[in-house]
Amino acid sequence: MDAILHLVRCFTDPTVAHVETTVDPVRDAEIIELELTMADLELVERRYQRVSKVAMSTGDKDAKAEANLLAKVREHLNSGQPLRTLPLTKEEREILKPYQLLTLKPMLVVGNVDESAESHQAFEQLQNWCREKGISAIAINAKLAAELAELSDEDASELAELYGSEVQALQQVVRAAFDLLNAITFFTFVGKEVTAWVVTKGTPIVKAAGKIHSDMEAGFIRAEVCPFDRLKEAGSWEAAKERGWVEIKGKDYEVQDGDVVIIRFQPPHHHR
């Protein structure tokens, strides 16, 4: 997995049981954070024993470097700190990648609130706790969002205006998760069929084309690009072109969130 989403209860409801009997989001978040840290420590501990033995018996420099890194990581985890707070170089991250360490992954904390003021105060405390730790936090009202999902679009949007963004729980979580993963969406179309593609922010268009098909990357000539909002305003691709809103981009152009793209490429000649 690429990230962790941690849903934390911020509402009081006697009909919904709670393991700790009281609702205290900061305590709950701390318990889970500590459990994840301990899980990482156990894994690093085991791995360190193995790698340091190899390093000592063979003197292999890669094994030595890995053992030293694991010792540093172990010490950090031992002090009860998640690995998110340990400064690591790009090379060190690469060495640790195969271990899939949980506290090294970006985390999104989602506070599940209700309409009450107490619930929002509880979320505020959780948000402050997250801020200190450099973790993103958002509030959603999952129960209300679930009830709105049953309603017609019209009624739902009226109620959503009344209650604010918390009831658009799914959109909010998706958007926050995209930010967390540094991901953006671009679109391609064939006739009336549109496909959404997800890439990392800063991806050059030639690489993005490769995500659609390897031939497109290999034979890339140019891309025609129009931001979605502009296309919507123009009403059609032709109209957007007439207004000069469709731009020709070379292979180094970085794809932007919401770009609508046509890739021009030279298909490879297949040998018979």
Image (cartoon, rainbow, N blue to C red):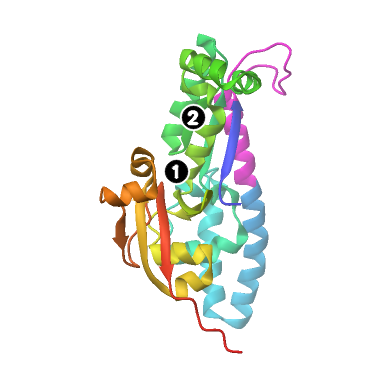
Q: In this view, does 127 lie above or below 86?
A: above
Q: Residues within 10 Å of mark 2 (few under 14, many from 20)?
A: some
Which label belongs to residue 101?
Answer: none
Report the span colored magenta. Answer: 9-38
Q: Horizontally, is 246 left or right of 206 in the view?
A: left
Q: Can residue 245 be seen in this view?
A: no
Location of residue 197 in the rendering, given as x and y in whole percent from the top left corner: 51, 53
Q: In which quarter of the image is the C terminus?
A: bottom right
**Residue wearing tag 1:** 179
Verify whether residue 84 appears in magenta.
no
Q: Dot 1 lies on which element? A: helix
Location of residue 37 in the rendering, given as x and y in whole percent from the top left corner: 60, 45
Closest to the observer, 191 or 124 = 191
Q: What residue type is labelled 1?
A: Asp
> Which residue is farthest left?
244
Residue 146 placement: quadrant:
top right
Verify whether residue 13 appears in magenta.
yes
Q: In this view, does 187 lie above or below 89?
A: above
Q: Dot 2 lies on which element? A: strand
Q: Using the numbered discs, state the Cα–Cα distance from disc 2 to disc 1 in whole angstroms.
A: 12 Å
